[in-house]
Amino acid sequence: MNDPIETLRLEFNEELKRLSTLKELEPHRQRFLGRKGPIQHLLSSLRDLSAEERPLFGKRVNDLKEFAESACDELHARFLLGEEAARLKEEGIDVTLPGRPRLFGRKHPVSCMMEELLDIFMEMGFSVQYGSEIETDYYNFEALNFGPDHPARDMHDTFYLRPDILLRTHTSPTQVRVMEHQRPPIRVVAPGRCFRNEDVTARSHVQFHQIEGFYIDRGVSFADLLQTIQDFLEKLFGAEIKLRFRPSYFPFVEPGLEVDVSCLICHGVGCAVCKHSGWLEVLGAGMIHPEVLRNGGIDPEVYSGYAWGMGVERPVMLRHGIQDIRLFTDNDPRFLEQFLEL
């Protein structure tokens, strides 16, 4: 057969029948329909034909080109459907398998405790004031009677963002900020998250939640502080809770004390959480230092006040017998689902 167009058509069809994948199809298309392929070569040869031969020959070559393109497109679609079907079969879902339950989100136990603490203090006449987690060195330390070289700063292993900017180590900076803008009587609680660069253990973490409270007015006494703490802890843990008051030192109060409760985890026998003492410290407190009152713009010769602060995780641990504070941040659903009814 001397007809080059028909010869090329037969050759194209024979090779097309041997193709079985998309990967093989593209080289075949390029071989016959590419810019250097035989069909393009036939079109280029039109200039060598006479004017009478050129129309018929050109039409036949164009018909061949359209045929080849259509055949490649059809085979491409067929291969594509076949490969998709094979992939879907391989990735198919077994509808007979049991379904996975969709868990509903709930409040974290620490958030629930924070709300409970705030409710107790709002019932006692305190208002709520939130502060920033990023604080200045002045409000976090200096205004609270921590001098630049005060040894008590060693008690607060601090995350500094800049020499004068830090992640707050307690919620006490809110105390001075409120005093700067309010006149006594002031009765405020300040909840929030705090940060200290400590070793992570069953008892401590680099981040924790704290609630700070303070009351400033004429004639506020140490007896008022003791009664407020006792009323609060009895509402939180029950009237039968045992309390222990110990003198202690904090730069921003004078005098200062720490308050322990009998360990509800071991019931006084001794465990890792209470360091086998039977007691667990829950808050620190004291009468606001006169220098702190002055830094807040309040005359300590006219007004007095008390302040206290406590961690929020520890009451949750006491109430539910949790012996490792790290469980609160592990995000383990086996732990968190125990508090779905809170």
Image: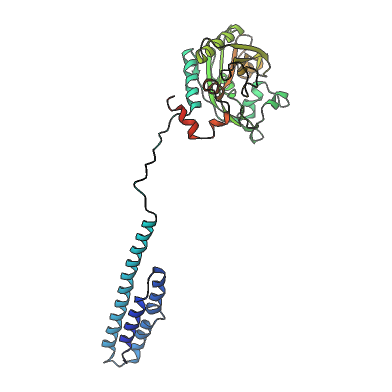
Decide if residue 48 is in sight here. Answer: yes
Decide if residue 150 is in sight here. Answer: no
317, 31: nearer the viewer: 317
As drawn, 184 above or below 326: above
Number of marks in picture? 0
Task: Please identify the quarter of the rendering in which residue 251 is found.
Answer: top right
Task: Please identify the quarter of the rendering in which residue 201 is found.
Answer: top right
x and y percent of residue 271 in the render? Answer: 62, 22
Q: Is residue 10 left or right of residue 254?
A: left
* Coloration of the structure image: rainbow
As drawn, 209 above or below 223: below
x and y percent of residue 332 in the render? Answer: 51, 35
Q: Quadrant of the C terminus?
A: top left
x and y percent of residue 248 in the render? Answer: 68, 15
Residue lying at 35% horizontally and 67% vertically, measured from the top left: 79
257, 199: nearer the viewer: 199
As drawn, 15 above or below 311: below
x and y percent of residue 132 in the render? Answer: 55, 29
Q: Quadrant of the N terminus?
A: bottom left
Residue lying at 34% horizontally and 76% vertically, measured from the top left: 17
162, 167: nearer the viewer: 167
Q: Residue furthest front?
A: 96
Residue lying at 34% horizontally and 46% vertically, measured from the top left: 96
Residue lying at 38% horizontally and 59% vertically, measured from the top left: 87
